[in-house]
Image: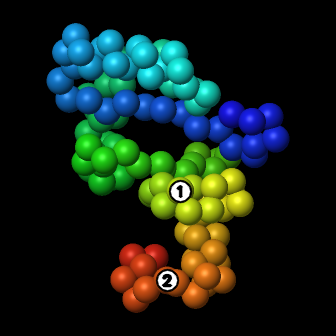
Amino acid sequence: MKMDSHYEIVWVPIVDNWDEDKLILFEILRNQMEWHPIGHHSVVSTVVRRYIKEKWNFNKKPILVVIDKQGVVVHHDATNMICIWGNTAYPFTINREKLLFKREGTFTSMEVKIWNQ
């Protein structure tokens, strides 16, 4: 992470069945990351994995869940925000996303429907 960032990223790999190849890949990726990866895959309990799948709708595709300083989820998946706008999308909240799309004039009725849920 850059020193001037106002946020940090923690990588929590959610894998149902670890095998030797996945463990090797995990170690390679973990050692190359600028993020904060968890220390070992086994620290992610079954309860945590189930919560992430059920409450955050994780289903194999990576997601970027944004949690504020109080521990409140402020965005369930900011992946598109970061891919489109990078650090200028900070803070990665639903309201910030709405504002950015509104400035672009590109948000659709589907996006509005998702935001209003």
Q: Quadrant of the C terminus?
A: bottom left
Q: Which sits in the foreground, 86 or 113?
A: 86
Badge 1: how crowded within 10 Å, few (<14), some, or many (20+)? few
Q: Position of residue 59 (x, y in %)?
A: 25, 48
Amino acid type, residue under disc 1 in the picture: Cys
Q: Which mark is residue 83?
A: 1
Q: In this figure, which residue is indicated by the disc labeled 2?
A: 107
Position of 76 compared to 41: left or right?
Answer: right
Residue at 66% x, 83% y is 103
Q: Position of residue 53 (x, y in %)?
A: 28, 46
Q: Secondary structure at mark 2?
A: loop
Give the image's coloring scheme: rainbow
Q: Quadrant of the N terminus?
A: top right
Amino acid type, residue under disc 2 in the picture: Phe
Mark 1–mark 2 Cα distance, whole angstroms, equals 16 Å
Residue at 48% x, 20% y is 30
